[in-house]
């Protein structure tokens, strides 16, 4: 049944399963776009990152009026998911089967959206919290809270998605705590429920991405001040061939290392003497900055996130604005230390504004011979249900479709929690 309201087809109770399954899309921010403009722009829009401003002492600020750099990231509507099937006239005598097939299609599309969000959170998040032991409870999540706090990530709207095994281990810890005797510990015991812990809303995954043990071995990277690996943020770049000014994506950096043999996308590492700083105060956190490998470019180069912005050698205003690490001891060569020592489930955590979903829609004609129904969830994710009868074969084609995009706007506001890293 489709409920019609203000000439818009909304999801009825028969589509409730699709909406209920949108657990992860409700835990990320949403950006609605004009579909006509997106079509003309090739389905890519540049989304601004937050400004980070500098302050100065004194009344006289004559020399401090400088241009500020507004960074942005590309967000693309690139996820096109469809579930097609056929029913013949005999099968359609059982209306219950049509409904069950539709429910299964909606469940699969909901899963596709959740997986898309998990993939980008698991693969591009740069904050890494390796825990030596198995998941045990509050202290594990508190480590994720600490790395976010010390680097200046907003303390609200934080989420942690745990694999079923790690989630249940934390629930066991809560259930065993006598001082929590009451509703929360009882719920943890009866329903394996964790709820809010250490500032995070926890979510249980019935699937989770996994990370393999790092196989890169002993590797080094050039970190001396002014080296080829220094990164300078820029809002735009100029094409060397056309002279055209183009937006620049500053989330990633190509770095030169001693070798990339055995290194794969997803690997996590720190660099000796390179410490994280608070993004606003620029004070050192006292902890090494964590990085992720995004891709391997060659035998000696790889793409990482975030870039290394130390702002320590005649820095530009943009470097001062967006400094994210500091090199305590200037050395020509620094050791890379891998953090994913053992294979493990990836438990992503993030601040809501870091991850963004871009709902989109297909302009399916309603006068071209096919029956078209549209449904949209409360958070704007739309599904299109179309069906068409073939008189020659007495078969009806069905398909459910959804179109959307997902972007990690701020890899330094999202991370991964890894257990069993001994």
Image (tube, rainbow, N blue to C red):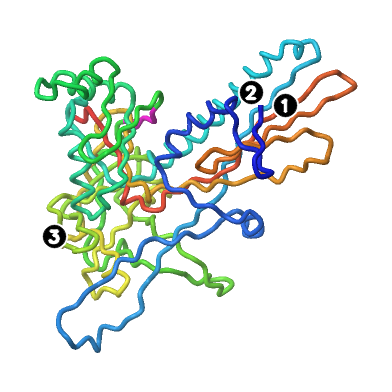
Q: Position of residue 313 (x, y in %)?
A: 23, 72
What's drawn in magenta, residue-wise? 208-212
Q: Residue at x 17, y 32 (%)?
A: 138
**Residue drawn at (30%, 28%), measured in percent from left and top?**
344
Classify mark 1: residues with Cα within 10 Å, few (<14), some (14-19) or many (20+). Answer: many
Using residue 9 as the reference point, say whether residue 194 is left or right of it.
Answer: left
- Choose the circle earlier in sequence order: 2 or 3: 2
Residue carrying label 3: 328
Q: Position of residue 234 (x, y in %)?
A: 40, 68
Real-space CA distance between mark 1 and mark 3, rounded to the nearest whole angstrom: 62 Å
Residue beneath the point at 18% across and 40% down: 143
| Comes first in the chain, label 1 or label 3 | 3
Q: Main secondary structure of the magenta part?
A: loop
Residue 102 is marked as 2
Give whichever of 9, 55 is nearer the camera. Answer: 9
Nearest to the eye among marks 2 and 1: give it. 2
> Disc 1 marks which residue?
398
């Amino acid at each position: 049944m489709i409920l019609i309201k203000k000439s818009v087809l909304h999801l009825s109770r028969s589509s409730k399963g699709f909406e209920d399954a949108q657990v992860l899309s409700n835990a990320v921010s949403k950006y609605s776009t004009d579909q006509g403009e997106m079509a003309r722009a090739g389905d890519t829009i540049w989304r601004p990152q937050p400004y980070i401003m500098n302050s100065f002492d004194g009344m006289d600020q004559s020399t401090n009026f400088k241009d500020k750099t507004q960074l942005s990231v590309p967000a693309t509507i690139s996820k096109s998911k469809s579930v097609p099937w056929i029913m013949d006239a005999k099968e359609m005598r059982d209306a219950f089967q049509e409904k069950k097939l539709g429910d299964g299609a909606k469940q699969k599309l909901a899963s596709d959206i959740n997986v898309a969000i998990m993939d980008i959170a698991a693969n591009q998040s740069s904050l890494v919290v390796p825990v030596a032991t198995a998941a045990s409870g509050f202290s594990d999540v508190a480590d994720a809270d600490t790395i976010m706090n010390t680097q200046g990530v907003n303390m609200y709207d934080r989420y942690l998605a745990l694999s079923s095994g790690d989630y249940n281990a934390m629930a066991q810890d809560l259930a065993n705590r006598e001082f929590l005797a009451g509703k929360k510990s009882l719920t943890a015991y009866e329903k394996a429920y964790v709820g809010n812990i250490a500032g995070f809303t926890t979510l249980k995954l019935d699937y989770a991405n996994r990370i393999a043990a790092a196989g890169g071995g002993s590797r080094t990277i050039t970190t001396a001040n002014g080296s080829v690996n220094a990164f300078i943020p820029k809002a735009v770049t100029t094409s060397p061939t056309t002279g055209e000014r183009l937006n620049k994506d500053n989330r990633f950096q190509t770095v030169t290392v001693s070798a990339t043999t055995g290194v794969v996308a997803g690997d996590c590492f720190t660099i000796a003497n390179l410490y994280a700083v608070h993004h606003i105060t620029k004070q050192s956190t006292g902890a090494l900055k964590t990085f992720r490998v995004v891709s391997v470019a060659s035998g000696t180069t790889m793409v990482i996130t975030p870039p290394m912005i130390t702002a320590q050698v005649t820095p530009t205003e943009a470097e001062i604005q967006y400094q994210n690490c500091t090199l305590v001891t200037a050395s020509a060569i620094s050791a890379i230390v891998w953090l994913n020592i053992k294979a493990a489930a990836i438990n992503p955590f993030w601040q809501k504004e870091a991850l963004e979903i871009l709902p989109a829609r297909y302009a399916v004609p309603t006068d071209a011979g096919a029956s078209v129904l549209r449904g949209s969830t409360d958070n704007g994710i739309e599904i299109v249900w179309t069906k068409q009868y073939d008189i020659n074969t007495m078969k009806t084609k069905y398909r459910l479709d959804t179109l959307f995009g997902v972007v990690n706007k701020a890899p330094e506001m999202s991370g991964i929690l890894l257990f069993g890293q001994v």
